[in-house]
Image (cartoon, grey):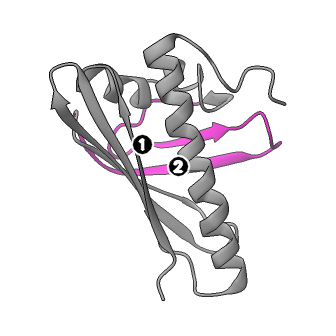
Amino acid sequence: MKFEFDVQIKIQKPVTEVFDAVVDPAKLSGYFVGSASGPLEEGNVITWRFAEVDLDIPITVREVKPNELIRFEWASNEDDYNTTVIIGFQAVDPENTMVTIHESGWRETDKGLFGSYQNCGGWMHMGCCLKAYLDHGINLRKGSV
């Protein structure tokens, strides 16, 4: 059995605005990461830091299709391999965007299963934080640590 998942959420903003909120490090740090060292642009290797953990996480951006898709790799919960994340953006209509997040690539081990479940919840949390940030101007992560 492959350890992979999909989560999705509809954001009540145009696809260009939603895509930019994920790519732009200043906006991303307004609702998801504590800091991002650069934009999610194809070929970039950037670092994400989360307030919840004292850890720098390298992100290797493999593919970017503006307003459609971002594909990157990052470390699994085991240090010797990466998983792949694909964030998709689909305009439902001019004012609404469906965001889907797919992550795959864990080894079929107990640690891989745990990591996949842990990240599934994390990505759903990211989607909810993105929605609160764009739809309502709220940073859900503020004060949560």
Q: Residue at x 65, y 48 (%)?
A: 57
User: For residue 96, which quarter of the picture?
Assistant: top left
Q: Which residue is mark 2?
A: 59
Name the front one of labels 1 and 2.
2
Q: Secondary structure at mark 2?
A: strand
Q: Residue 131 in the image: state x and y as whole percent.
A: 47, 26
Q: Magenta span has 47?
A: yes
The magenta-colored residue range is 37-66
Secondary structure of the residue carrying numbered label 1? loop
Residue position marked by numbered label 1 in the rendering: 44
Which quadrant would the C terminus be assigned to in this image?
A: top right
Q: Compute the Cα span from label 1 to label 2.
A: 8 Å
Q: Check the image and report above or below for 144 versus 103.
A: above
Q: Is residue 126 visible?
A: yes
**129 shown above or below 47:** above
Which badge, 1 or 2, comes first in the chain's sequence?
A: 1
Query: What amino acid is labelled 2 in the image?
Result: Ile
Residue 82: name its quadrant: bottom right
Q: How dense is the environment of label 2, judged by Cα within 10 Å: few (below 14), some, or many (20 and up)?
A: many
Residue 34 covered by magenta stretch = no
Residue at the outermost top position: 137
Question: Which residue does the image show at 70% across and 27% down from the upper left?
Answer: 141
Q: Residue at x 63, y 66 (%)?
A: 117
Q: How many marks?
A: 2
Looking at the picture, how far across and down is residue 6, in whole percent? 42, 59
Q: Residues at badges 1 and 2 in contact (C-beta under 8 Å)? A: yes
Amino acid type for the residue under numbered disc 1: Asn
Q: Residue 47, located in which quarter of the rendered image?
A: top right
Residue visible at 52% across and 49% down? 59
Q: Is residue 30 left or right of residue 56?
A: left
The 10 Å Cα crowd at callout 1, few under 14, some 14 to 19, many 20 or more, is some
Label of residue 125 in the image? none
